[in-house]
Image (cartoon, helix red, strand yellow):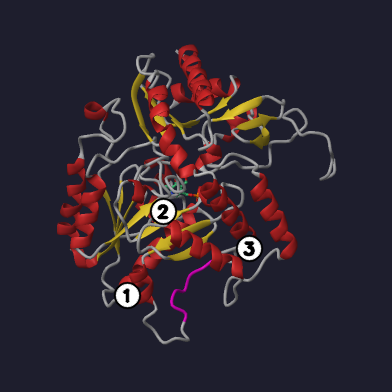
Amino acid sequence: MTQHDPQPLSKETLSLEHYWMPFTANRQFKAKPRLLSKAKGVYYQDTAGRPILDGTAGLWCCNAGHSREEIINAVSHQIREMDFAPSFQMGHPLIFQLAQRLSQISPKGLNKVFFTNSGSEAVDSALKVALNFHRANGEASRTRFIGRELGYHGVGFGGISVGGIPANRKSFSAQLLQGVDHLPHTLDIETNAFCRGLPESGIEKADALENIILLQGAENIAAVIVEPLAGSAGVILPPKGYLERLRQITKKHGILLIFDEVITGFGRIGDAFASQRWNVIPDMITTAKGLTNGTVPMGAVLIDDHIYDICMNAPKDTIELFHGYTYSGHPVAAAAALASLNIYQNEQLFQSSKQLENYFENAIHSLKGLSNVIDIRNFGLVGAIQFSPSQAGIGKRAFSIFEECFNRGSLVRVTADTIALSPPLIIEKEQIDQLINTLSDAIVSAD
Ligand SMILES: Cc1ncc(COP(=O)(O)O)c(C=O)c1O
């Protein structure tokens, strides 16, 4: 077969043996593959030609739906105009334009942007910026980081060190960053099960930060990093007042606060960023995914002016940050991001997610009472259903529900015994119904 063979590739004609798939049970997948070949709007199509309703915006990224003409045109135009420009010592207008556009939608004061190619790189970059800032600010002893249990911050060594998902750390534990502490996670099913929106109880979990500061000394701590709403570990919500308290404590001790908004950015919970929806402004925001509507890899760190200004306190001809990527600010990604921002703005998608959230909340909570459902959590257009583990082992029940949903034409996301939903923000009420009905049937059939 040539590269341009028009024959559609299917699981019957394709060799699956060479590709080592990420975060996938490779042998299980290859024995029973799920292959997607097309996408438009809120639907995928699999290689058998079946429509698959996208309940996950791809992987939390295609917020404006799939294969949007505006992005296709912008990207193809940009490749024709200029496919690549060196990112070190050179620039191109689009990326400056994009940084300016991002500063217009970012929380107050976060007006500087460092570009990366993924969420993981954004996290590692933010950690480095934090160290660079304290050093430039005359506080070089501030080197420690504080993450949170069950946090997911990508897969770089920085990200897994501040992250708190045991499976992602275990094999690499001997080489994780030194000098990292973890806050307790905020999932408390016993107290908060089936709460709608943010849990009332749990603000005191933020006070653990004071204990860590007491133990390690504020003068040694560079930054705290948390997801305002943790997605990957199964949609864990911040209790009411929790993020505000983290902000108060970090401010009091001169510690930077980083919100990892790789999932919550670009309208997922009803504003450009969770920071704005919950009115808590960190010193940096890491983002990716929805930035280009998932079309071209790109991540970014949004940085407070004060951090940038301090880091610029050096002779004018010196490099202020010895960090960057060949593809930082790639022109094709920049074109995709600008086109995505135009769609978000023209279609007021951040607001539409807010408008749909009550409907979505009622729909997802209608699954309460089905067998083995032990919790349902939601905010904006993100939600999760948690199951009791089956006798076959942790994660087995949710995985079979995920498979069953796919067989019945809906894509949902599975992590451990949780099914998460994060549909494109253009989803309509009937499609939310379709998603929930499929899920309900799958839960019943998996029982
Ligand atoms: C909160 C958060 N941070 C970082 C990442 C890593 O992003 P990427 O997979 O683009 O490296 C993710 C990915 O899901 C994420 O959810």
Q: Who's the residue at 54% across and 34% down the image?
A: 25
Depth-wise, is mark 3 or mark 1 nearer the camera? Answer: 3
- Identify the amino acid type marked 1: Arg
Instruction: Determine which residue is flagged by label 1.
Output: 135
- Compared to residue 441, the image places residue 414 above or below, namely below
* Residue nearest the viewer, comparing 402 with 408: 408
* First along the sequence among labels 1 and 2: 1
Q: Who's the residue at 20% across and 43% down the image?
A: 205
Instruction: Determine which residue is flagged by label 2.
Output: 159
Instruction: Determine which residue is flagged by label 3.
Output: 331
Q: Could you tell me residue 127's position as x and y percent?
A: 38, 62
Please state the extent of the stretch shown in magenta in the rendering: 319-325
Is residue 383 magenta-colored? no
Q: Could you tell me residue 162's position as x and y percent?
A: 35, 53
Whether residue 442 sits left or right of residue 246 in the image: it is: right
- Identify the amino acid type marked 2: Gly
Q: Could you tell me residue 81's position as x and y percent?
A: 73, 64
Is residue 324 magenta-colored? yes
Q: Who's the residue at 72% across and 26% down the image?
A: 49
Q: Quick check: is the Cβ at mark 2 less than 8 Å away from ligand 1?
A: yes
